[in-house]
Image: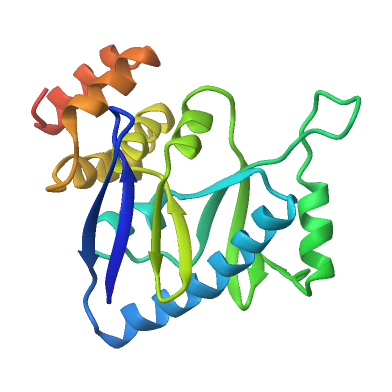
Amino acid sequence: MARKTTRPSHRGKNRTYRQVHSGDTPTRTREKNMQVVCDVLEQLVGEGTLKHYAIGDATAAGFHGEPLATRDVDVFVFIEPAPGSLLVSLEPLFFRLAELGFSEFEEEGLLVHGFPVQFLSASPGLETEAVEAALVAEWDNHRIRVIRPEYLAAIAITVGRPKDRARLVYLAELPDFHRSLFIDILSRHDLRKRWDEWAGALGLEN
């Protein structure tokens, strides 16, 4: 499936490129699942339940390269605080999803058309910036917002699990990985020292 994708560059200009995934049955099935999930997310943005969202973690990493094995999808979201409150709650989101017929949970998350979705409130700083700078892709009258690989790599450094180190290697070796943007992100979020340590240990170009 060919996707026409508008990617916001770190210089503030948009450019368009095409990304093609394989046509095997598992990939087609997963893309169909993602279509219906993203249709619901776009509806929530359109009606104001969500301010912004972006797909993250393994699902987003697979979007930028070869699809990765993961059963659920992590969605980073912005929700406006209730009037008079400084605290952000996901309750209004879950309430609206229940109204739409999505109230069943599995261990991995809320089932949206049978697909487990974990909703994560984007924390201030790096995650917030990552959602705001998300890539927006459109295909077959569907839209998906995905965290860029450079931000995914930076977030992986902050988390630090073994699978995050493996994901960092995968992301850093993608042909479309912009190292200058990545270094800029690390510098602005005080992650250069940790990156230097990881790069040396993992044999990555520093």
The residue sitting at 69% across, 48% down in the picture is 50
Which quarter of the figure has residue 178? top left
Q: Tell me the quadrant of the picture where the C terminus can be found.
A: top left
Give above or below for 152 relative to 117. above
Examine the rendering and report whether any part of residue 174 can be seen.
yes
In this orientation, which residue lies closer to the viewer: 104 or 5? 5
Examine the rendering and report whether any part of residue 107 can be seen.
no
Give above or below for 71 relative to 144. below
- The type of colouring in the image is rainbow
Find residue 3 and report its horizontal and vertical position in percent: 30, 67
The single residue placed furthest to the bottom in the displayed view is 25
In this orientation, which residue lies closer to the viewer: 116 or 22? 22
The residue sitting at 23% across, 21% down in the picture is 183
Find residue 173 and report its horizontal and vertical position in percent: 13, 44
Find residue 196 and report its horizontal and vertical position in percent: 20, 17
Give above or below for 46 relative to 202. below
